[in-house]
Image (tube, helix red, strand yellow):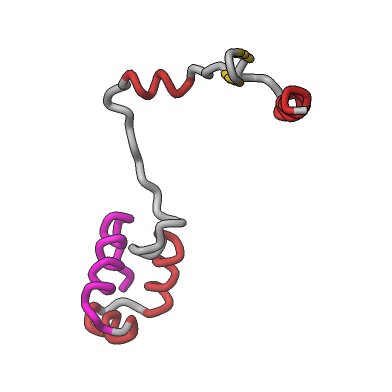
Amino acid sequence: MRKFRSPDQWRQILKDQQQSGLTISEFCRQHKISVSCFFSQRKKHGSVNDTKSAFVSATVTKHTATEVQRDVKQPIVLELSAVRLTLPAETPPEYLVMLLNGLLA
């Protein structure tokens, strides 16, 4: 007879097997689960230690000032002797190379 288990129950079974120290075959025999069903559910729900397939839900509970400041692009400031040059943050790197080569030549 087929027994229905929820996704949460399967995740717990997968976790229990890993913590049991038993082989999958032995664990399945003791818990009356077919090995093929076990592997099918493991593929479906992911291995407990498999971070690539495990989905983690996260919510932002509080925005901090540092998070907001990261979005603000700071200007590029070049200082050479008594000269200070301020450029927009969006200045292309190629232009910076040409500028520095010209200043240092």
Q: Is residue 101 above or below residue 76?
A: below
- Residue 61 occupies quadrant: top left
Q: Quadrant of the C terminus?
A: top right
Measured as percent of width and height from the top left, residue 51 is found at 40, 57
Q: Residue at x 28, y 55 (%)?
A: 8
**24 relative to 74, above or below:** below
Looking at the picture, tell me which residue is in the foreground, 39 or 91: 91
Dominant secondary structure of the residues highlighted in magenta in the image: helix
- Left or right side of 53 for 62: left
Residue at point 31%, 76% (across, down): 33
Residue 39: name its quadrant.
bottom left
Q: Is residue 84 above or below residue 40?
A: above
Of 86 and 84, the residue lying toward us: 84
Q: Residue 83, position in %: x, y? A: 61, 13
Q: Residue at x 40, y 19 (%)?
A: 68
* Residue under the image location 40 percent in, 54 percent down: 54
- Judge whether residue 9 is colored magenta: yes
Q: Position of residue 37 (x, y in %)?
A: 40, 73
Q: Quadrant of the N terminus?
A: bottom left
What is the x, y in percent for residue 69?
41, 19
Point out the stretch of residues depicted in magenta. 1-22
How many tags in the picture? Answer: 0
Question: Camera-side residue: 82 or 50?
Answer: 82
Residue occupying the far front of the picture: 81
Asked if residue 98 lies in the magenta stretch, the reply is no
Query: Residue 58, located in which quarter of the rendered image?
Result: top left
